[in-house]
Amino acid sequence: MGGAMITGSSGSPSTSIPPSAVAFGDSNWEGNGFMSQTTKDTSANDQAHWRKTTNLMWTHLAIWFFFGYVIHFFAPALNKIVIFGFPLGFYMAAQGSLIAFVVQLFMFAKQQDKIDREFGVAED
């Protein structure tokens, strides 16, 4: 169950590579148990990317919650405003929220793509 052995110039084993590094082709394994500097930098890049992505997600979730639930609490007051013969409360429930969700979907995709490109993880 041990790892693969790297042999020194004399042919004797010098360093043991963990089985996970061999099985998953981990090219960042350096024998001393620590990852290379490049991987550490990537990790910091990944953390910054995830932080921005998470903030974007929470922002859009709040907007979704507003249009999905909060706006409907004000339907009686919005019904006093009439657009094309329909009360605004009805319009927001039947069409307005759906339009907001579709617009939000495209905005989210565009903003996420911008974040991905900023951190070098964009899909082309």
Image (tube, rainbow, N blue to C red):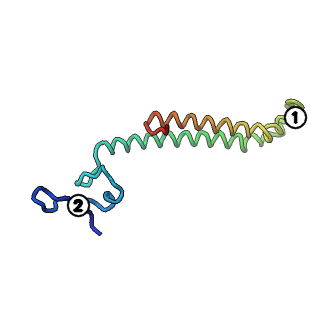
Above or below, comparing residue 34 to residue 92 in the picture: below
Mark number displayed over residue 10:
none
Which quadrant holds residue 4?
A: bottom left
> Measured from the top left, where is residue 54 in percent x and y?
52, 43
Q: Judge from the rendering whether residue 116 lies leftward or rightward of residue 63; answer left or right.
A: left
Task: Estimate the spatial distance between the alpha carbons at disc 2 and disc 1, rounded to whole Å.
Answer: 74 Å
Q: Residue at x 58, y 38 (%)?
A: 109
Q: Residues within 10 Å of mark 2 (few under 14, many from 20)?
A: some
Type of amino acid at the residue the image marks with label 1:
Phe
Q: Residue at x 64, y 39 (%)?
A: 105
Q: Residue furthest bottom?
A: 1
Type of amino acid at the residue the image marks with label 2:
Ser
Which quadrant holds residue 57?
A: top right
> Measured from the top left, where is residue 36 in percent x and y?
28, 46
For marks 2 and 1, the one nearer the N-term is 2
Q: Residues within 10 Å of mark 1 (few under 14, many from 20)?
A: few
Please name the residue that numbered disc 2 is placed on.
Answer: 16
> Measured from the top left, where is residue 26 in percent x and y?
33, 53
Q: Judge from the rendering whether residue 51 lies leftward or rightward of residue 42; answer left or right.
A: right
Mark number displayed over residue 86:
1
> Measured from the top left, where is residue 48 in percent x and y?
43, 40
Q: Secondary structure at mark 2?
A: strand
Q: Quadrant of the N terminus?
A: bottom left
Q: Residue at x 34, y 41 (%)?
A: 41
Q: Residue furthest left?
A: 10
Q: Nearer the viewer, mark 2 or mark 1?
A: 2
Q: Which residue is more in the foreground, 11 or 59?
A: 11
